[in-house]
Image (spheres, rainbow, N blue to C red):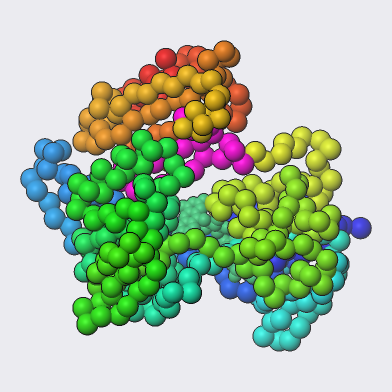
Amino acid sequence: MAVRFVILGAGPAGNQAASYAARHGAKVTLVERDVVGGAAHLWDCIPSKAMIATGGAMAYVERSEGMGLASLDAALDPDALKGRITAIEDRLRTSTEDLLSDQGVRVIRGTGRLTGPHGVAVETTDGTEELEADAILVATGSRPRIPDWCEPDGDRILTTRQAYPPPVLPEHLVVIGSGVTGVEFVHMFAAFGSKVTLVVSRQQVLPNKDPEVAAALEEEFLRRGVRLFIGARAVGIDRTDEGVAVRCDDGRVARGSHALLAIGLVPNSEGLGLQDAGVDVDERGYVPVNHHCQSNVPHIYAAGDLSGKLPLSSVAAMQGRKIAEHVMGMQAREHRHLDYDKAPQAVFTEPEIAEVGVAETEAFATGRKIRVTKVPFSSNPKALINNDARGFVKIVSDPATGIVLGGSIVGGHAAELISVLALAVNCNLRVVDVVDSLLVHPSLAESLSEAAE
Ligand SMILES: Cc1cc2nc3c(=O)[nH]c(=O)nc-3n(C[C@H](O)[C@H](O)[C@H](O)COP(=O)(O)OP(=O)(O)OC[C@H]3O[C@@H](n4cnc5c(N)ncnc54)[C@H](O)[C@@H]3O)c2cc1C
């Protein structure tokens, strides 16, 4: 009899697991309370990157003078932008729904919860449906963290989910939080022409990144007129006649027309009946998992943001696929564990930032011997042709074996270029393999080869 596999949440983790398990013969039921595609499509990756693409087009127009063109001008049309975001989301949702349907996945619209180790109840508009499962995946994602010192009103005080785009383009946006999400919002609204102030609780933006990478972004923000409140932790937001006043713990006040909160996420683990099924949940609300993404109850898996691993769509999708392999007993054959340390990560700002594997600072901190090579894009022909020679490529390798351990790229198309280094890091390639590979000329990728020398 086919394995009965029930999945809660149709984000990247749930969808990949459903699709892959169905292709390999499981009887899959996917339960989603909102839209297929999950928060990733509706609130996070897709709308934010669509807005950044529009901001990027505006920044490109700004740089057009240096490309032999007479000066151009671009003005934002928020309604057209909203329409564009909705069209992309619709297209992606429909194609995912079609794919799942072709693969025989049953999708139920409703809110699911575990009723015991093998039972799931789904509340739908028609009542409650009870399901029996041999394996269960809980992939219910996360939502923006709201601190107790402020209450978003969707008008002047916004969460990221209320900013796609906001009804009125902020004249002056105060962004609270300087992690990846925060700096991406700074970049997009600065590109749209808003004044922006960024409240940075630590000593650099992107606190978990290589300081050299963070410094390149800070420099660009300052060049674009972004105000940085470094070392200031927000402790309150007041509505004022002009808009908002963000109070910081060092006494400074950041004033603006709007404030946007980008201070992390909270896992969606409440009301799922996890305790009824005997599943452990940690004090922060995440479900701890092993390298197969199994919870303490072996046939109940957790993936995506709920699993407390790297909160990335790419990671969630790969976890989903690995879970499907495990549920279908395929781990005995070709199955490689997911190595979170080798996941490439990108920050979609200008300049774009991407990193993979071992960082230079991390190696120094642990005393690990490394070789670091770095080249700027300023001598890359394609970068000069593109009129954007900002940034650099840095490669970290093992001095004894030449194996590529990691790398950072700051500059145009960094998120695409990092794939080469991600492949090298994941497949234990050596720097000489990168150097010996023929590349297109002129291309930005030539700087990877140069940096690997
Ligand atoms: C602003 C922003 C931008 C981002 N950009 C990127 C990016 O560019 N690249 C990247 O890799 N990552 C990005 N991320 C992270 C990425 O969005 C998440 O890591 C990813 O969405 C996690 O996927 P998931 O499968 O865990 O769940 P989600 O995508 O969160 O989906 C979970 C689904 O579960 C459903 N659900 C919840 N409870 C129930 C229930 N009881 N019953 C039924 N359904 C339920 C929800 O409705 C939701 O649809 C971004 C995050 C943010 C906040």
Residue located farthest toward the front when viewing the structure as drawn: 250
Residue 360 visible in the displayed image: yes
Left or right: where does residue 401 sit relative to residue 158? right
Left or right: where does residue 412 sit relative to residue 226? right
Above or below 424: residue 273? below
Residue 168 visible in the displayed image: no
Q: Image quadrant for the C terminus?
A: top left
Q: Quadrant of residue 176?
A: bottom left
Q: Residue at left 29%, top 56%? A: 229
Residue 93 point in image, percent of width and height: 54, 64
Q: Which residues are magenta?
A: 340-360
Q: Residue at left 67%, top 85%? A: 125
Left or right: where does residue 136 sit relative to residue 232? right
Q: Residue at left 31%, top 44%? A: 217
Left or right: where does residue 235 sit relative to residue 24? left
Residue 322 point in image, percent of width and height: 71, 46
Total marks shown come to 0
Which quadrant of the picture is home to ligand 1? Answer: bottom right
Q: Residue at left 81%, top 42%? A: 330
Q: Quadrant of residue 428?
A: top right
Residue 339 point in image, percent of width and height: 65, 38
Q: Image quadrant for the N terminus?
A: bottom right
Comparing 56 with 213, the one in front is 213
Comparing 296 with 418, the one in front is 296
Residue located farthest toward the left when viewing the structure as drawn: 70
Residue 447 drawn in magenta: no
Comparing 28 with 170, the one in front is 170
Q: Quadrant of residue 139?
A: bottom right
Residue 424 point in image, percent of width and height: 55, 26
Above or below 214: residue 91? below
